Amino acid sequence: MAGSVSTPAPDPAALREALVASPALCPLEWNEQRTAVLFGRFSEEAYRAVSFFDQRAVPAAERTGVVPWAMAEPWLVELPRRCDFLFHVSHCGSTLLSRLLGTAEASLAVREPGILRGLTAADPEARVDAALALLSRSFHPGQRPLIKATSIVNAVAGRLLDRTADARAGLVFVPASTFLPSVLDGSLSDIQAHAQSRWSRLIDGGLAAPAPHSPGEQAAAAWLCEMLALARLAERFPERTCWVNFEQFLMSPEAVLAELAGFYQLSIDAAAVLAGPLMQQYAKQPGVRYDVAARDALLATARTGHAAEIAAGLAWLEATGCLQRLPEPTLHP
């Protein structure tokens, strides 16, 4: 936990006041038994910088401490649940969109809170409500959290929207032909870590197809699993969801960003924001220079170096017969 100082838990009254008062105490991770949560203290400025509100955020925290969930849940369940979401397929520019939307005065961008990854479809409403209440706190009146969830949280995204009545959700994706080279070129370990759970989700959703084996097929299965999850959300909540093709954003960034800001009811000068530094840096590591040209070059190299696996993944996708279950805007923007 370099960069932070762990301190003994405060007395219950002080802890309750701190948790209810503001998002400065941010939940990061459940313990293995899901009986306690690691919290970190962050300034509003640190919120803007952090890419992952989980263990990776510990060095940016002023202090950390573990809170028993049985103590905190009763304090939280009655708090308002007022937040919006960015759900996505992973490796699709959602972090950049979160940072751009987070420049709005009324937006508090919260990226990949680990507490959501610990929720399951079987959890009681109180646990879900308390977690959402934690993520609905804001630093200022009129400020509304915009939560960019980790892609595997799509498995419970319907519950999150059910329990947050006025929440809006952007559904961010890239076509499979872009997703496959992106992950095959350096992010396959993340795909393989969740391969079994995603395959189980696909089977539970009615998929009747051979299991994916090669790296390209596993990447394709990950994309299909999360795309189908987003499609189910769009079908259930048509007035509260909005598809965002990141490739289309890159072609017309000002128009798409303005449309997305309008969807979330945010006031953003899209041209000014896009002219700033965010479009010239790697969103997850702002200190690293990265732009559209660098992305295109990396994708071109990956498409050449992984051509066989990309072809295998795309062939597997076609063989599943599931592409027809995706809405037209996700296939032909």
Image: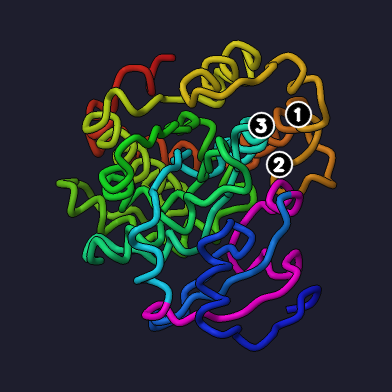
Q: Nearer the viewer, residue 73 or 195?
A: 73
Identify which residue is drawn at 62% across, 48% down. Answer: 139
> Where is mark 1, residue-wise?
279
Indicate whether 59 appears above or below 42: below
> Which image quadrant is residue 197 in?
bottom left
> Where is mark 2, residue-wise?
283
Q: Secondary structure at mark 1?
A: helix
- Tell which tag, 3 or 1, sits nearer the viewer: 3
Q: Crowding at label 3, few (<14), some or many (≥20) Cα neighbours within 10 Å?
A: some
Quadrant of the rendering where the N terminus is positioned: bottom right
Q: Crowding at label 1, few (<14), some or many (≥20) Cα neighbours within 10 Å?
A: many
> Where is mark 3, residue-wise?
105
- The boundaries of the magenta stretch are 45-71
Q: Nearer the viewer, residue 271 or 166?
A: 166
Q: Secondary structure at mark 3?
A: loop
Asked if the magenta segment contains residue 273, the reply would be no
Is 132 displayed left or right of 55 in the figure?
Answer: left
Q: How far separated are the C-alphas under marks 3 and 1?
A: 19 Å
Indicate whether 186 appears above or below 27: above
